[in-house]
Image (cartoon, rainbow, N blue to C red):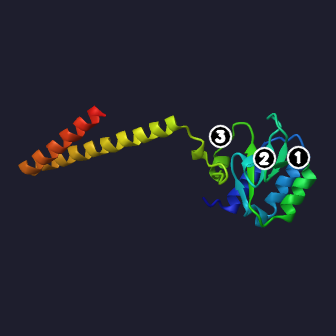
Amino acid sequence: MFVNVSEKKEFLIWFVNNVSFSQREVLWILNYLINHEAILNNVHFIERAEKTTRGIKITSSEMDDEPIKLFITNKEFTDTDQIFHEIRMNWKEALYVECIFEDSWQNGQYLSILEDNPYARWNEQVSEDVVENINNFFAHEEKQAKIDFLYRQIDLALEENNHEAFLELSNELNRLKIDSSST
């Protein structure tokens, strides 16, 4: 998914203006990103930054965690000078940013820029039961759509006085209903 730089910038401006951080250096780093579109072009907002090869987790003051953490290939850094230096020196590399703040899942602006983490895809974390339920739901919906389609075709056959089509479609509908009730 490609997210426009202006959308990322708008979110970061909102983030800076509406969320509190326990270290002012976090604001400096965020403002640096806002003012450098070349860097922002390589920023991807994701979940689970710790799973990436180069990620930053930014946490609001309401949450119980370090205000900012840098993850580089299974190593963790919390020194803001070191984090800033990493961003500035390696600006051409992809940077995965996770934003932890209250009610983030109710924030449309945040959700609109959120991308799938290539190092920890969301669908790899879904249980087999959930996958099975989703597959069953879609199978049921597909059968229901076929049944609805057959009803419309039967109505059309009746309107056109097409006895042969009516019988054929009715038999197909009955087979589908029998299959549905046996599964």
Of mark 1 and mark 3, the one earlier in the sequence is 1
**Badge 1 density bin: few <14, some 14–19, many ≥20, Cα 10 Å:** some
Between disc 3 and disc 2, the foreground one is 2
* Residue 175 in which image quadrant: top left
Which amino acid is tagged 1? Thr
Q: If you read the primary sequence from the N terminus, does the residue marked by circle 2 or circle 1 appear first?
A: 2
| 44 left or right of 32 in image | left
Please report the residue visible at 84 percent of the width from the left and 46 percent of the height from the top. 68
Judging by the rendered image, the residue that carries numbered circle 3 is: 105
Q: Earlier in the sequence, mark 3 or mark 2?
A: 2
Tag 3: residue type? Trp
Indicate the secondary structure of the residue bearing disc 2: strand
Q: Secondary structure at mark 3?
A: helix
- Residue 89 position in % (x across, y down): 86, 64
The residue that label 1 is drawn on is 78
Residue 59 position, x and y percent, is: 80, 42
For the point 23% across and 41% down, the residue is 176
Q: Which structural element holds mark 1?
A: loop
Which of 135/74 is in front?
74
Q: Quadrant of the N terminus?
A: bottom right
| Residue 176 visible, this orientation | yes
Residue at (90, 43) in percent of width and height: 23
Q: How far apart are the alpha carbons under marks 2 and 1?
A: 10 Å
Q: Is residue 141 left or right of residue 55?
A: left
Tag 2 residue: 57
**Mark 1 to mark 3 CA distance (whole Å):** 25 Å
Question: Amino acid type of disc 2?
Answer: Lys
